[in-house]
Amino acid sequence: MNSWKVPFVFFLSLLIILVGSSCSSETAAPVIKADVEISNQMQITSTAFEDGGTIPTTYTCDADDLSPPLAWNDIPEGTQSLVLIVDDQDAPAGTWVHWLLYDIPPCVDHLPEGPPPTETVPGIGTQGSNDFGRIGYGGPCPPGGSPHHYYFKLYALDMLLNLEPGMNIDDLETDMSGHILDQVELMGIYVR
């Protein structure tokens, strides 16, 4: 190999490593095929409510309609991005999507209360369209009567989706298919 090619190959390799690392100076984890068995070892919590507990009114359409703070850990090796899907499976018309947030960097381990309803949230990810027809979070807003169960589902993917803002649930789930390394959910209840 010519003497000029060795430094060039080294420089090119170093550049690829640096560009591929979005959260820190560490190198990106190797990509793992998504045919691994889902371990459900990840954990997701909120300081606003416990799993199976009541979602406070401030996180609903009856008050401030802010998304609750969330935190997670035990992300599997090889995770290239995270996806958060929030839905209500008790809605009269079928599952109602309240929030789609994707391409979350794997170094992000929490979401603060109430990220803005913008197409992208710097340092956090890209937001899709909810079933209210808006970008970002739309809080619980059930009809009166029986309790509704809201699932905050976090997925670890072996790829970065690179999807446009405003994606709907069908397109998001299609692109996620075959790339899920692990998943976990937090469930909260709200009744009016």
Image (cartoon, rainbow, N blue to C red):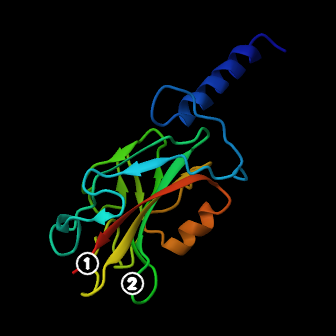
* Residue that lies at the very extreme toward the left in this rendered image: 63
Observer-nearest of 6 and 37 = 37
Which amino acid lies under the numbered mark 1 shown in the image of this protein? Val
Q: Which mark is residue 161?
A: none
How crowded pointer 2 is (Cα within 10 Å; few <14, some 14-19, many 20+) is rated as: some
Which amino acid lies under the numbered mark 2 shown in the image of this protein? Ala
Q: Where is residue 59 in the image (x, y as percent from the top left)?
A: 23, 65
Q: Residue at x 45, y 35 (%)?
A: 23
Give the CA distance from mark 1 to mark 2.
Answer: 12 Å
Q: Is mark 2 on a helix, strand or loop?
A: loop
Observer-nearest of 151 and 110 = 151
- Could you tell whether 89 is left or right of 77 in the image? left
Q: In this view, does 21 lie above or below 180?
A: above
The answer to whether one can see residue 99 in this image is: no
Q: In this view, does 3 lie above or below 172?
A: above
Q: In which quarter of the image is residue 65?
A: bottom left
The mark that comes first in sequence, 1 or 2, is 2
Pick the quarter of the image with the C terminus: bottom left
Observer-nearest of 39 and 113 = 39
- Could you tell whether 168 is left or right of 110 in the image? right
Q: Which residue is drawn at 50% across and 47% down?
A: 42
Q: Which mark is residue 91?
A: 2
Q: Where is residue 89 in the image (x, y as percent from the top left)?
A: 44, 78
Pick the quarter of the image with the N terminus: top right
- Could you tell whether 93 is left or right of 170 in the image? left
Q: Mark 1 points at which residue?
A: 191
Q: Where is residue 76 in the image (x, y as percent from the top left)?
A: 57, 41
